[in-house]
Image (spheres, helix red, strand yellow):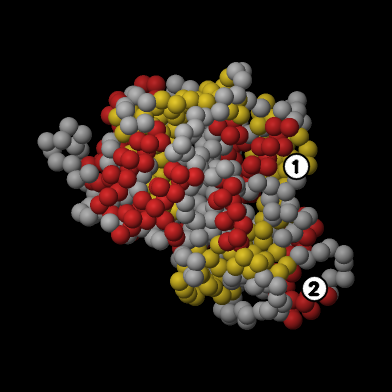
Amino acid sequence: MDPAIKSELEKYGDDVPFRAVTNHTQSTWARTFHSSPELFIQPQSIAEVEKVVNLARRCRRRITTVGCGHSPSNITCTSSWLINLDNFNKILSADRETGVVVMQSGIRLYSVGEQLDAVGLAMPNLGSINHQSIAGAISTGTHGSTLRHGILSSSILELKITLSNGKTETCSPDQNEELFRASLISLGAIGIITEITFQAVPAFTLSWEQTVDTDLRMMNNWDKTLWTQTEFVRVWWFPYTRRAVVWAAEKTDLAPMPPPKSYYDAWLGYHVYHNLLALGHYVPSILPWVEWFVFGMQYGFANGSKSSAIQPSRQALLMNCLYSQFVNEWAIPISKGPEALKRLSSWLNHLTPDDPDYVAHGIPYSAEGLYVHAPVEVRVTETSNSLTPRPHLDPTCTEEATLYLNATLYRPYDMDPPCHARYYQGFEFLMRELGGRPHWAKNFETTGEDIEAMYGENLENWRRIRNDADPEGMFVGEWHRRFILGNGPRLALEEVETGRKKFRKGGVLVEGVVGGFKDEEDEGEGSESGESFDMLRASEMK
């Protein structure tokens, strides 16, 4: 550890621990980005968080906060100080009658679900995974797929957040509302969320059924009952076979019934698909056949094939992310959904006017020799009628329900797919043309100028609140500057990216400096996040 840091620590003379290690390598779950922070710190109390912030200010260091690292972007990369709140993970209170739950911010969503279930409560909605910390899920606008709920932050009643002055503030719709709205989607750039008050609901069970059929049938039902047939609905769209799986779930009092299993499920299917994707890396033209085979084996080759189950909500709403991946998800008006899918299909499938599914795609990039992975995940939320304070950086629509299109590209054995750049170039062009906004936690490449146009006054207000809370940029890095902070002057503690190197295990190692100087390499006991994520992936297959 830097002697200057040790000297500052000695000045405290208190018994509040400073739980830091050196030589830590932090990796995203997908192993797309890696960084080597000067210190990796795991506080276990608000007092410890406040001490870290005060010490960082004295030592002129930037602070980044990370949970499970499931975002495949470089938003949490740092060469300065990295805070992880995995050990600050308790539910402090849960009122069965009111459903009001108070929890520490580092708790993972799977633990929230398990502990709430023990007292007869549940989260009203979930995204596709539950490995994130509650604070990370809030800070990036995580959502599920239902027209009866908004994004996850709509269930937040109150936050405690430690700011760059070392003080922890309470904010809610009734207290510090502007700070509350900015912190609901803070992107880690305002402070460290330490405590969350959440509105839970009585625990519930879902009866779900999924049906595979032509995408034409799905789109013909778009404005009828597709999204309203049950409380929870999501779709997986397969561009080459022009099919779609519609998953619909409703609350039930029936006894649980596990999903059907076959010899192909779990280990065999997992490795067959992984190796076919790897082969597609070298022979991309096989990917349409891979889509037909893999998802035919999983969902059925015949149109109309169905499967069903009855599960607790904390299990039913999840899906397996499988392998390392890039994800590029955008929010567009729900009314634009059929147009988006038809134009994407015409582009990827090179459709001509004599094809009954043809529409002019208008994408100014060639799809010649372009082969992509499947499926495209299609989900919805409804926030236009919400009565809760709207986050300044909420990407959802204000005039109608929101549709999310998520273009996933797998990285078999950590290899970047050859279609990556051109597919996302065309996909993002289409999303922007349809009035879309990118999901903050995903791999988008749109410009900061585009984002300024998308958010306008809301972004200006968020910047103002952020600058008031953190005038020196203690929580600001290169990602924030590129996408949301504009071309203003660099802040005193803002971290600037200085380089990228290929990492030995795949992906890139990102390096940065704070305040115009590069920190010296330190010696000490090391740890590596990649090991924990390997364990996480193994557990998902069980």
Q: Is residue 437 visible?
A: no
Tell me the CA gap for discs 1 and 2. 30 Å
Read off the residue under disc 1: 91
Residue sitting at 77 percent across and 56 percent down? 44
Looking at numbered disc 2 in the image, what kind of residue is underneath it? Leu
Read off the residue under disc 2: 9
Q: Is residue 274 visible?
A: yes
Q: Position of residue 339 (x, y in %)?
A: 28, 36
Looking at numbered disc 1 in the image, what kind of residue is underneath it? Ile
Q: Nearer the viewer, mark 1 or mark 2?
A: 1
Residue sitting at 68 percent across and 79 percent down? 523
Pick the front one: 376 or 181: 376
Q: Quadrant of the C terminus?
A: top right
Pick the front one: 457 or 407: 407
Q: Quadrant of the N terminus?
A: bottom right
Whether residue 361 is situated above or below residue 417 in the rendered picture: above
Q: Secondary structure at mark 2?
A: helix
Residue sitting at 84 percent across and 63 percent down? 16
Q: Earlier in the sequence, mark 1 or mark 2?
A: 2
Whether residue 213 is situated above or below residue 103 in the rendered picture: above
Q: Are marks 1 and 2 in contact (CB under 8 Å)?
A: no
Q: Secondary structure at mark 1?
A: strand
